[in-house]
Image (cartoon, grey):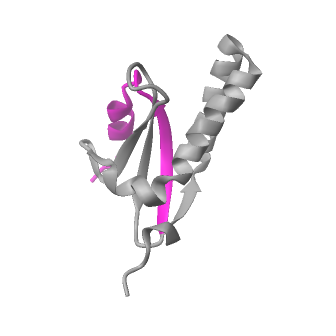
């Protein structure tokens, strides 16, 4: 019997956790703590939906072993990307980037060198 997608466990790396904290700080500085709480809550909830949605993720060009999904509240404008890898048991969220960041270059710089 095939494993149900909902049985996948989502883990958030220390790097992604630190990035979420930076996102919270940025939003709190500009829009207030309540907005920051709401927005980071939205991002965290989106990450917890990955067991159902991970197959919709796109491959990362510079790191084909990774995938990403766009997380944004509105259909237009900026948002954030979750970069992850998965196996048959776990979805590991590695990074959370703002859409305006040059996140592909950041990931390329992290790539293991032959």
View extreme (bottom): residue: 1
View extreme (left): residue: 61
In the picture provided, is 20 more to the left or to the right than 106?
right
* 99 magenta-colored: yes
Number of numbered discs: 0
Residue 35 position by quadrant? top right
- The residue range painted magenta reads 90-114
Residue at x 41%, y 24% (from the top left corner): 101
Q: Does residue 22 lie above or below 48 as drawn?
A: above
Q: In this orientation, does residue 22 appear? A: no
In the picture provided, is 109 more to the left or to the right than 26?
left
Q: Residue 98's x, y, as percent?
A: 46, 27
Q: Does residue 19 lie above or below 100 as drawn?
A: below
Q: In this orientation, does residue 13 appear? A: yes
Residue at x 37%, y 39% (from the top left corner): 107
Residue at x 36%, y 37% (from the top left corner): 109
In the picture provided, is 39 more to the left or to the right than 8?
right
Which quadrant holds the N terminus? bottom left
View extreme (top): residue: 30
Residue 71 position by quadrant? top left
View extreme (right): residue: 33
Q: Residue 5's x, y, as percent?
A: 43, 68
Q: Nearer the viewer, residue 57 or 106?
A: 57
Q: Residue 44's x, y, as percent?
A: 60, 43
Q: Residue 100's x, y, as percent?
A: 40, 21
In the picture provided, is 87 more to the left or to the right than 28?
left
Q: Nearer the viewer, residue 70 or 17?
A: 70
Q: Does residue 85 lie above or below 14 as drawn?
A: below
């Amino acid at each position: 019997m095939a494993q149900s997608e909902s049985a996948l466990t989502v883990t958030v790396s220390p790097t992604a956790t630190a990035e979420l904290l930076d996102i919270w700080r940025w939003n709190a500085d500009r829009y207030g703590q309540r907005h920051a709480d709401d927005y980071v809550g939205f991002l965290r909830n989106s990450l917890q939906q990955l067991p159902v949605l991970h197959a919709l993720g796109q491959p990362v060009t510079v790191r084909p072993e990774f995938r990403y999904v766009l997380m944004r509240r509105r259909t237009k404008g900026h948002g954030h990307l979750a970069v992850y890898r998965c196996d048959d048991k776990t979805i590991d969220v590695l990074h959370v980037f703002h859409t305006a960041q040059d996140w592909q270059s950041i990931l390329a710089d992290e790539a293991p060198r032959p």
